[in-house]
Amino acid sequence: MRPQPNSLYARDVEYVLHPNTNARRHEEIGPIVIDRGEGIYVYDDQGNRYIEGLGGLWSVAVGFGEKRLVEAASRQMAKLPYYHTFSHKTNEPSVELAERLVKMTPERLRRVFFTNSGSEANDTVIKMVWYYNNAIGRPEKKKFISRLNAYHGITIASGSLTGLPANQRDFDLPFLPVKHVTCPHYYRNALPGEGEEAFADRLAAELEATILEEGPETVAAFIGEPLMGAGGVMPPPATYWEKVQAVCRRHDVLIVADEVINGFGRLGTMFACEYYGIDPDIMVLSKQITSSYLPLAAVLISQEIYDGIADNSGRIGTFGHGFTASGHPVPAAVALENLDIIEEKGLVANAARVGEVMQSELRTLSDHPLVGEVRGVGLIAGVELVADKATKAKFDPVGRIGAQVFAKAHEHGLIIRAIGDVIAFCPPLIITEDQVRDMVARFTRTLDDVA
Ligand code: PLP
């Protein structure tokens, strides 16, 4: 249907360049205008209701329309709508949030730096690590190691850590000295007959060989999402993280856990570091920190890194990094209320319990002719669609069937995300067992329609 002249649809197509979207295709099909939300549901301006199977962009933990967050923002706006945290200024919500984050994250993380987005947080990580290594007299130790299919953001620096062609190709990325090692996806990357632990051994050996080849004196940090999200929802093979950590420690390479998607209960533990036994030097948090009602991200660092930075800034007079909105009181107040809700409603335990139902319901689709693999932990899952189940052959071109499923799901009142031909699920943590069954039933009908 052609949009009415001057309608919101027509003006969207006329004026907006959408992020992560095929612009020409968007001109053809136009937007869906999301108008309001309640619980796990959003409504478009035609009155259609959708289950938000991806919680927005992996992020709306407490669901849509949570009045307590609106009120927390409103109270803070009325009291102090903005102030910065440069030059010895601070404000109550940002201090309270920093203390709370330090107390709830792994023991070694002692200080918090706030940014607006996950991308800026990962840029901040790079700059902090460089500044720290300059400060402690090893200026040559600057390289980062990441993984293929990783997603760490889209700015010049964080986009260099990302390992996805669509975010790099034709943007001249990676721009920085980043090495990408194999993606720890067992289904796609294990050798025939290789067990999970043997696969993990091989990947740890590859990481070590990469560090040795580059020279350990030049490698600063290894960054990873504990469970890879936006690259296609890929939980690591058993023993992967303990082996990777051992390699990093051996060569004095910092470990950065990017928990932008994983953090605040997604896997059924408060942080994925807990789930996989990771003891990071740096942790990055965002998204569910405010349920994405307002933009906010946080970088947590160890005392050692903090001391290196503090000593250096004492010497040169300043730590010259920060954003206008670093420590903004309004998102910080929303984050505090959001964390209260997560705790009071037991949403981490809910993610574990209902997550098991979601995982087992989705795995009933393993026999579906289109489905190659169902994978995930807690309330995050990926369903990989393949042209041939036996050979795992991908559809040609990759992404076409994913796009069909994505579009068809709308007709069944379901929003999911297609990452190529992997369909991702990451619903709000408030979702109930019945709602999970309803979501998977809608998805099953979608797949049947497309098959
Ligand atoms: N890191 C991870 C693991 C992410 O999934 C994302 C976004 O999806 C980012 C970083 C970037 O966050 P933002 O989109 O807020 O810049």
Image: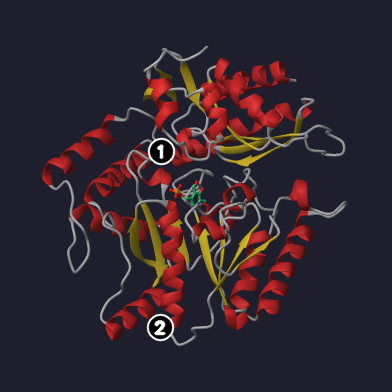
State which quadrant residue 417 falls in. Answer: top right
**Quick one: SS at disc 1?**
loop
- Closer to the camera in the image, 13 or 427: 13
Quarter of the image for the C terminus: give it: top right
Q: Are marks 1 and 2 in contact (CB under 8 Å)?
A: no
What colour scheme has been applied to the protein in the rendered image?
secondary structure
| Residue 360 pos. (x, y %) | 66, 31
| Residue 290 pos. (x, y %) | 35, 43
Question: Mark 2 or mark 1, which is nearer the start of the sequence?
Answer: 2
Say if residue 341 shows up in the picture.
yes
What residue sits right under mark 1 in the picture?
346
| Residue 439 pos. (x, y %) | 56, 23
Crowding near the residue tagged with mark 1, few <14, some 14–19, many ≥20 C-alpha atoms within 10 Å: some
**Quick one: SS at disc 2?**
helix
What residue sits right under mark 2 in the picture?
135
Would you place residue 295 above or below residue 216 in this image?
above
Tell me the residue at 50%/52% (across/down): 154
